[in-house]
Image (tube, rainbow, N blue to C red):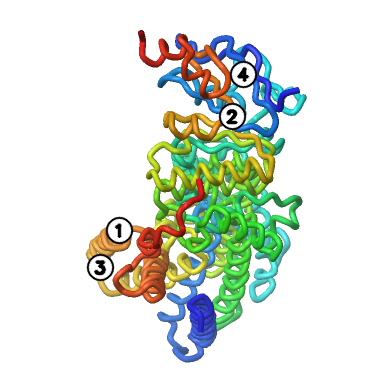
Amino acid sequence: MSLLEVQAVSKAFGGIQALSNCSITVEQGTITGLIGPNGSGKTTLFNVITGYESLDSGEIRFDGRVITGEKHDQVFGLGIGRTFQLTRVFPRLTVLENMHVAMPRKGIRGLLKYWGPSQEQRQALDLLDFVRLITLKDEPAGNLSYGQKKLLELALILVVQPQMILLDEPAGGVNPTMINELAGFIRTLNEHKGITFLVVEHNMEFVMGLCHSVHVMHRGTTIAAGPPAMVRKNPAVLEAYLGV
Amino acid sequence: MKPAQLSRLLQLLALVALVTFIGIFPVVIAPNDTVNTIAVFTLIGAIAVVGWNIFSGYSGYISLGHSVFYGFGAYTLGLASLDWHISGGWEPFLLLPLAGLVAGAFALPLGWIGLRTQRRTFVVISIAWVFIFQLLAYNLRGITGGSNGVFMPLTPWVAPYADLPFYYVAFAVLLVAVFVSWWIRHSKFGLGLLAIRDDEDRALGLDVKTAPFKLTAYVLSAVFVGMAGAIFAYYVGSVYPDQGFNPAVDITIVIMGFLGGMGTVAGPLIGALLVTPLQQWLDLQFGGQGVNLMIYGVLFLAILLLLPRGIVPSLQERWRTWRAARKHGWLTAHPLQARSNQPAERRGEG
């Protein structure tokens, strides 16, 4: 059984069919790429999976459980974290405070307590150390560079120890050094923590070097899937990208 | 000493100095009725803006209608004193918690309805509450006495010490308000409110319970504004619909909040300590031909121009820059620059 199964999902915005009968599966423990020309429905698919958009038809299963129609906070609680194409951190909170927002706390007494008891603080600092933002922990997140914000976003969702992370264009607008750094973090998390990744990305070098398998989307549906080397030579993919 | 410790020590010293100053102020100045009157109004304004900040400052939802709760508090104290035949003196002060609770109880449905909207729409809705309840207060004569107003119990205290009970009661309530505000700012609940201020939808995505958080903060802030209104009404001796539900109170609260710095614990307090005395002093000096309002307007514009984020956040930014400069040497004044100058060994393994 695959970890994530998206079956025949459709979604229209007015007259525009963003997703039509789109199906993909993501195997447990893999890094899966999702590529396709602009407007092919990649981000919409992400939004539908993570509950930011409702879907018109189809079914989504995560870990054997139907999650179709769950809201984004519920999906997050089930262990699917995501990052956004345009980074979304809390700009006026410090980097460390950003981490604590994501820390789960149950009950009213938990909410009234100071936000950083030692154990939570330790976990937050460890994660910041992992993404190498520890020296910036007291800096307002709005002052970070674009790439650093992406790292912070990654650290934010690691707080809840998700089974699966969806990354929306993690390398977009990030300098080459940090792209390599980011790829390293993703690989480490995948190998050592067993986190499954689904990555939308336009940077082919990044996708081909990182992913175990790649799905290609075009006009709201998947037109090819397989290992990077095979997908690269697929005539349908070449046609979608190059229009030949 | 580490900068963090130094910062904490300075904050503590400032707090002790401020509390001592406010605590002994009337003893040092007294007996001076004019100054003491201004001081009482200042403390009442401070309670209101500290309360308002718990909701509007932390969550970023600007309420221009918290004077509704000011009015509920004022009428609660007046009507309860009348109905229960409470005579002037210390007893009406015992009604302050009730005034706060009534304001909070009204805040529950008002917040539940108003907070269903986006934050820009909410500003307008909040203003509407003021006018709706002002109209109701004028027209529900059976309860409020309409435009005749409600008279508070007469106090037995005589000049020059008549203001002191009000002063110290307001001071005590203010201390409670600041403590609650400080607690919230350092709790997970308050952090959630600040996250809502920065990006509400993202906060919801990270499992922050945004709707209950906002409503709770709204009710809590109403409790303190209600108590401020009750002290005000008892102090001036009466409450009328246009005084209880008074848009000018809202404007003053917002100015105090903006000047001091919204979303901080100390900001609203500092704003209140500056704005009310200034306002009252200008009234006394230039009140005759309305010159006071012109000066007031010019000052307000100057503040917006020079300190758009408020005093406390601006100072915090200076402090941060100074600390970073000390840590990384004066040439790289910013830690972000310092990081990008690090050698290549810090680069990723990918």
Question: Looking at numbered disc 3 in the image, what kind of residue is underneath it?
Answer: Gly
* B204 to the left or right of A220: right
Q: Nearer the viewer's eye, disc 4 or disc 3?
A: 4
Distance from disc 4 to disc 2, alpha carbons, whole Å, reads 15 Å
Between A170 and B75, the one lying in front of the other is A170
Q: Residue at left 47%, top 65%?
A: B268
Distance from disc 2 to disc 1, alpha carbons, whole Å, reads 55 Å
Q: Which residue is mark 2?
A: A212
Q: Residue at left 61%, top 36%?
A: A165
Q: Residues within 10 Å of mark 2 (few under 14, many from 20)?
A: some
Distance from disc 4 to disc 3, alpha carbons, whole Å, reads 77 Å
Q: Which residue is mark 3?
A: B288
Q: Which residue is mark 1?
A: B304
Where B302 sits versus B286, above or below?
above
Q: Which residue is mark 4?
A: A24
- What chain does badge 2 belong to? A
Residue B339 image position (x, y, % from top left)? 40, 61
Question: Looking at numbered disc 2 in the image, what kind of residue is underneath it?
Answer: His
